Image (cartoon, grey):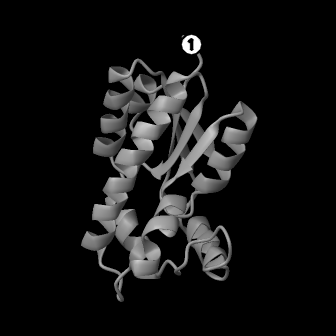
């Protein structure tokens, strides 16, 4: 099997996706695309207070579309791409696997695991740095954390097999 050209980094809130994706891109001499970076640069400054999930998700989907188009172009030129988009649902992961197949790109799914208690501890530490360069401009509340926990669908063994998956415990 050829070396993966697209790497999907998957995990729930606080799993360490961005740190892992940054290190992976460096190791592969690839390009990292992070939804947090794109949303921070393009939309968070205009976010409604309180944060509206419908408003947020519409913009996340727009960013995901443009990230995919750019990453597919870059990967098609032989540069590995690491997508740090959360990939919280089976449907989202399947959509990107389909897109990669249509573009004749190989994929590897990296599933990051950590106990919820540890991930919440990491979120609290990250919240203390909210708004600093390279950080989200807002704190993740317990309600937000729990909401994502309820939505997150861990990859099955079958999904991991189909996506040349790697399970990482942090």
Looking at this view, name the residue that lies furthest to the bottom: 49
Q: Position of residue 70 (x, y in %)?
A: 46, 39
Task: Quickly name the residue at label 1.
Answer: 2
Q: As drawn, is 87 to the left or to the right of 1?
A: left
Q: As drawn, is 34 to the left or to the right of 44?
A: right
Q: Position of residue 135 (x, y in %)?
A: 62, 71
Q: In the picture, residue 130 is in which quadrant?
A: bottom right
Q: Position of residue 4 (x, y in %)?
A: 55, 23
Looking at this view, name the residue that lies furthest to the top: 1
Whether residue 168 is situated above or below residue 45 in the rendered picture: above
SS state under label 1: loop
Instruction: Name the residue rendered at 61%, 66% in the picture.
Output: 118
Instruction: Name the residue rendered at 35%, 46% in the picture.
Output: 65
Mark 1 Cα shell of 10 Å, populated few (<14), some (14-19), many (≥20): few
Whether residue 85 is situated above or below residue 57 in the rendered picture: above
Q: Is residue 152 visible?
A: no
Of residues 144 and 155, which is closer to you in this image? Answer: 144
């Amino acid at each position: 099997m050829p070396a993966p050209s697209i790497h999907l980094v998957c995990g729930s809130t606080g799993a360490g996706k961005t740190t892992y994706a940054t290190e992976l891109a460096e190791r592969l001499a690839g390009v990292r695309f992070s939804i947090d970076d794109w949303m921070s640069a393009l939309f968070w400054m205009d976010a409604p207070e309180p944060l509206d999930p419908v408003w947020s998700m519409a913009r996340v989907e727009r960013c995901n579309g443009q990230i995919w188009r750019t990453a597919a172009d870059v990967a098609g030129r032989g540069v590995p791409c690491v997508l740090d988009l959360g990939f919280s649902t089976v449907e989202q992961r399947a959509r990107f696997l389909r897109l990669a197949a249509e573009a004749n790109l190989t994929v590897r799914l990296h599933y990051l695991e950590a106990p919820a208690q540890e991930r919440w501890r990491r979120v609290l530490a990250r919240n203390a740095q909210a708004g600093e360069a390279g950080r989200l401009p807002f704190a993740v509340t317990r309600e937000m954390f729990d909401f994502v926990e309820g939505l997150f669908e861990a990859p099955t063994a079958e999904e991991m097999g189909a996506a040349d998956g790697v399970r990482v415990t942090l």
